[in-house]
Amino acid sequence: MSLDYEEAAVADCATVSYMRVIAQRELRNRNAEIINAVSRGDSFIVTRNGEPVAELRPIVHGRNRVVP
């Protein structure tokens, strides 16, 4: 089964990437499939009532995090 979702351009510094837009209900109903897609490198913007509320994306390993 393929994941067909709306895509949104997201600018981060000088990089533009595309995230799939998915409703909260779709995430709930197809969570295993979506988490598998994230583990393959896909990213999602989760919406509630059409408004973006969260990003779901893979963890970048080897990245230094600064904690103040």
Image (cartoon, rainbow, N blue to C red):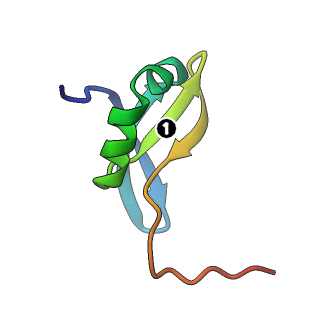
In the picture, the quarter occupied by the N terminus is top left
Question: What residue did someone put label 1 on?
Answer: 45
Indicate the position of residue 54 as horizontal and vertical percent values.
60, 40
- Residue at far front of view: 32
Residue at the (31%, 44%) spot, across then down: 37
Identify the residue at the far left of this view: 1
Question: Residue 32 is drawn in which quadrant?
Answer: top left
Q: Is residue 26 above or below residue 35?
A: above
Residue type (three-letter) at the residue carrying disc 1: Ile
Relative to 19, say whether 67 is above or below.
below
Say what secondary structure mark 1 lies in: strand
Q: Which residue sits furthest right?
A: 68
Q: Is residue 12 above or below residue 20?
A: below
For the residue carrying disc 1, how many other residues have a C-alpha within 10 Å: few (<14), some (14-19), or many (20+)? many
Q: Position of residue 15 (x, y in %)?
A: 39, 64
Q: Residue at x 54, y 44 (%)?
A: 55
Q: Position of residue 64 (x, y in %)?
A: 56, 84
Against 53, residue 14 (above or below) is below
Q: Does residue 60 appear left or right of residue 36 in this picture? A: right
Q: Residue at x 26, y 26 (%)?
A: 4
Quadrant that contains the C terminus: bottom right
- Which residue occupies the foreground of this view, 14 or 1? 1
Q: How many discs appear? A: 1
Q: Position of residue 59 (x, y in %)?
A: 47, 63
Q: Is residue 28 left or right of residue 15?
A: right
In the rendered view, does 8 fall on the left or right side of 54?
A: left
Q: Residue at x 49, y 61 (%)?
A: 12
